Image (spheres, rainbow, N blue to C red):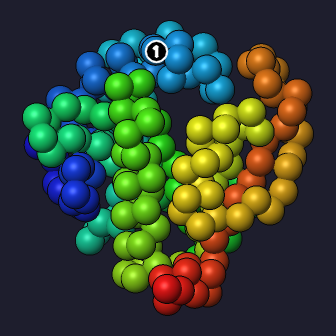
Amino acid sequence: MGAVDIETERMVLRRFTPDDVDDLVALHNDPAVMRYLGPCDETAEHVRDVLLPYYRSFDRPGGGYGYRAAIERDGGAFLGWFLFRPAREDPQPGVIEVGYRLHRAAWGRGFATEGASALVDRGFTELPIHTVVADTMTVNTGSRRVLEKLGMRHVATVHPHYDDPVPGTEHGDVLYALTRAEWTAARRAP
């Protein structure tokens, strides 16, 4: 198992290792998982030679940032992954993006909220950040619910151009944000 960064009640979030290649191939080739992202024909070679090095490029000494494999504590199943990295759109100091991609078996069981919440909490308590952002397709109501459970607020709807759009793209993408002040106020609320 890779270096453990975060343990939640039901998951371990750890750095990726070469042993995760087959699990990532299966995750990224599931049409339901990729419904809002577009078709994927992922190969083990691409995951090993391109994706894993990319995911690991965000690792920093002491942890905190990066892509993390989500492993179920009860049984050790690979659930998917979470990310906590500098925002890819308009990167600014102190602005971090949170995201996730989970196997269908993990959907509707609270894993996305549990993992993302652990990353957001760690970010605001241990890292020099002031805002956490996220984006998803407008029609991806499941992901939107997760972001709202985190306390994030809808800040914009954008209509980016995609060369090979998936169904629902015409409705745009929604951007969400949570500031340190908002997170702190929510933790103090009864």
User: Which image quarter is the N terminus in?
Assistant: top left
Between 7 and 151, the one nearer to me in the picture: 151
Left or right for 100, reference 35: left
Choose top left, top right, bottom left or bottom right for residue 73: top left
Between 41 and 187, the one nearer to me in the picture: 187
Between 110 and 180, the one nearer to me in the picture: 110
Q: Residue at x 37, y 64 (%)?
A: 118
Above or below: residue 178 compared with residue 85: below
Residue 184 image offset from top left, x and y in percent: 53, 86
Above or below: residue 83 compared with residue 167: below
Choose top left, top right, bottom left or bottom right for residue 152: bottom right
Left or right for 5, reference 81: left
Is residue 70 at least partly visible in the picture? yes
Above or below: residue 134 compared with residue 78: below
Type of the residue with mark 1? Asp
Choose top left, top right, bottom left or bottom right for residue 140: top right
Q: Residue at x 86, y 46 (%)?
A: 158
Is residue 57 at least partly visible in the picture? no
Residue 135 image offset from top left, x and y in percent: 68, 49
**Secondary element type, mark 1:** loop
Left or right for 166, reference 41: right
Q: What residue did someone put label 1 on?
A: 30
Left or right for 96, reference 106: right
